[in-house]
Image: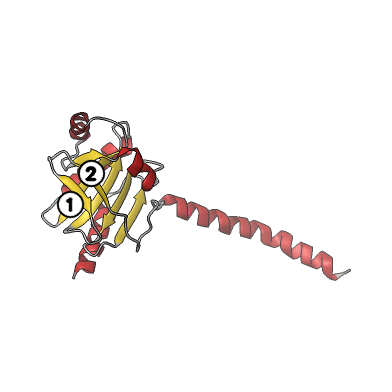
């Protein structure tokens, strides 16, 4: 029986360290939560009517690097990241904003411009919100031209995060 008290004493000494390790891992994971579709995977095909009058269809291999952002008009982080996303729109990067609110397209355009979004927007619609399992906004994906997700993010994206993801997407295309 003398061995059992030693084992229990060792476990009692190890528990605080185990709790600390679990807490650190949990905090690190929640600092930059991934969206439903992970980095390295692919997004499902979908279509959306956009504010520029076009209909966007995501295929397995997009024509350009794609920045897909799910947003809402009431979302303060969405407003904070709007200039970052707008600045990313170039001839080789397509930025699309899909609102999770059931709002007519004309009203979405007005709301998006009010938030500082200067890129095509559309409505995600209930089916797409469910399909992408959008739980919080903003949710952003960056997809390389080969269709592979290089950024999967819930929460406002910073300029440096987006630039890093765009660089990774460009490297995949070469």
Residue 53 marker = none
Q: Is residue 62 above or below residue 81?
A: below
Q: Position of residue 67 (x, y in %)?
A: 24, 52
The correct choice, above or below, for 87 with respect to 78 in the image is below
Q: What's the image's color scheme?
A: secondary structure
Q: Quadrant of residue 170?
A: bottom left
Q: Is residue 128 visible?
A: yes
Residue at x 22%, y 34% (from the top left corner): 115
Q: Residue placed farthest to the right in the image? A: 1
* Viewport quadrant of the C terminus: bottom left
Which of the two residues, 167 or 39, is positioned nearer the viewer here? 39
SS type, badge 2: strand
Q: Are marks 2 and 1 in contact (CB under 8 Å)?
A: no
**What crowding class fits label 1: few (fewer than 14 Cα within 10 Å), some (14-19), or many (20 or more)?**
many
Q: Residue at x 36, y 45 (%)?
A: 155
Give the residue displayed 27% in from the left and 30% down from the top: 103
Look at the image and tell me whether residue 84 can be seen: no
């Amino acid at each position: 029986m003398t061995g059992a008290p030693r084992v229990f004493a060792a476990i009692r000494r190890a528990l605080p360290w185990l709790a600390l390790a679990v807490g650190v891992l949990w905090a690190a994971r929640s600092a930059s939560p991934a969206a439903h579709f992970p980095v390295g995977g692919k997004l499902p095909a979908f279509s959306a009517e956009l504010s520029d009058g076009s209909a966007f269809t995501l295929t397995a291999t997009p024509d350009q690097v794609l920045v897909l952002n799910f947003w809402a008009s009431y979302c303060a982080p969405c407003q904070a990241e709007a200039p970052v996303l707008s600045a990313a729109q170039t001839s080789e990067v397509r930025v699309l904003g899909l609102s999770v609110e059931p709002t007519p397209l004309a009203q979405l355009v007005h709301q998006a411009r009010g938030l500082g979004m200067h890129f095509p927007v559309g409505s995600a619609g209930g089916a797409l919100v469910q399909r992408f399992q959008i739980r919080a906004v903003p949710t952003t994906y960056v997809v390389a031209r080969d269709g592979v997700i290089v950024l999967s993010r819930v929460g406002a994206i910073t300029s440096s995060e987006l630039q890093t993801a765009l660089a990774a997407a460009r490297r995949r295309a070469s």
